[in-house]
């Protein structure tokens, strides 16, 4: 877990083939975005975009991909994927699902602690951490 926002929890992804890959998990849990009332939905989507801004800023990524699929896991969760210029040519312009998730670098608390602390600090500076 990185930090708590008003709409939910920011966590680092369980694989880190794209450094800084994070998720926003709503609290309370809902099955999908359309189950949220308008105010809650606006806050969740806004906070998701700010998480993306922060990851873009601190990683040097060239863009952020956002995904909410819900096909396998029936609980809303927003993926925030930084995309980098130095990604392998055959993967750079494709969805992240083309990466080899089975052999990707797994989350490592000692290695990933620094980026988690920086994400939390910048989100706090922007007034989103509660």
Image: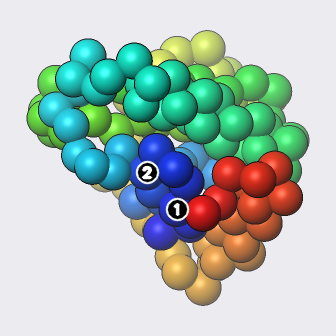
Crowd tier of the residue under label 2, counting other residues whose Cα lies within 10 Å: few below 14, some 14–19, many 20 or above? many
Residue 34, given in percent of the width and then of the height, sits at 26, 16
Of 99 and 70, nearer the camera is 70
Q: Which label number is shown at residue 125?
A: none
Q: Secondary structure at mark 2?
A: strand
Residue pictured at 52% horizontal, 50% vertical: 6
Snapshot quadrant of residue 91: top right
Question: Does 78 sit above or below residue 26?
Answer: above
Indicate the position of residue 73 as horizontal and vertical percent values.
Answer: 16, 38
Residue drawn at 65 percent across, 42 percent down? 51
Reading the image, the residue beneath label 1 is 4
Q: What residue is shown at x 78% (from left), y 66% (from top)?
A: 121
Question: How far is disc 1 from disc 2 in space, using C-alphas?
Answer: 6 Å
Q: Is residue 67 left or right of residue 47?
A: left
Q: Residue at x 64, y 22 (%)?
A: 92
Residue 14: give x, y in percent of width and height: 40, 59
Q: Do residues under tags 1 and 2 come within 8 Å of each other at their CB atoms?
A: yes
- Up/down of 39 relative to 24, above or below: above
- Image spot of residue 20 (x, y percent): 64, 52
Residue under numbered circle 2: 8
Decide which of 83, 33 is in the foreground and name it: 33
Q: Does residue 79 appear in this view?
A: yes
């Amino acid at each position: 877990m990185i930090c708590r926002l008003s709409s939910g929890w920011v966590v680092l992804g369980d694989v880190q083939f794209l450094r800084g890959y994070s998720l926003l998990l709503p609290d309370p849990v809902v099955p999908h975005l359309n189950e949220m009332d308008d105010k809650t939905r606006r806050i969740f989507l806004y906070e998701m975009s700010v998480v993306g801004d922060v990851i873009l800023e601190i990683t040097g990524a060239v863009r952020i991909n956002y995904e909410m699929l819900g096909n396998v896991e029936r609980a809303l969760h927003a993926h925030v994927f930084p995309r980098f210029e130095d990604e392998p040519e055959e993967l750079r312009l494709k969805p992240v699902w083309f990466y080899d998730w089975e052999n990707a670098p797994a989350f490592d608390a000692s290695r990933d602690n620094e980026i988690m602390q920086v994400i939390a600090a910048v989100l706090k500076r922007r007034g989103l951490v509660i």
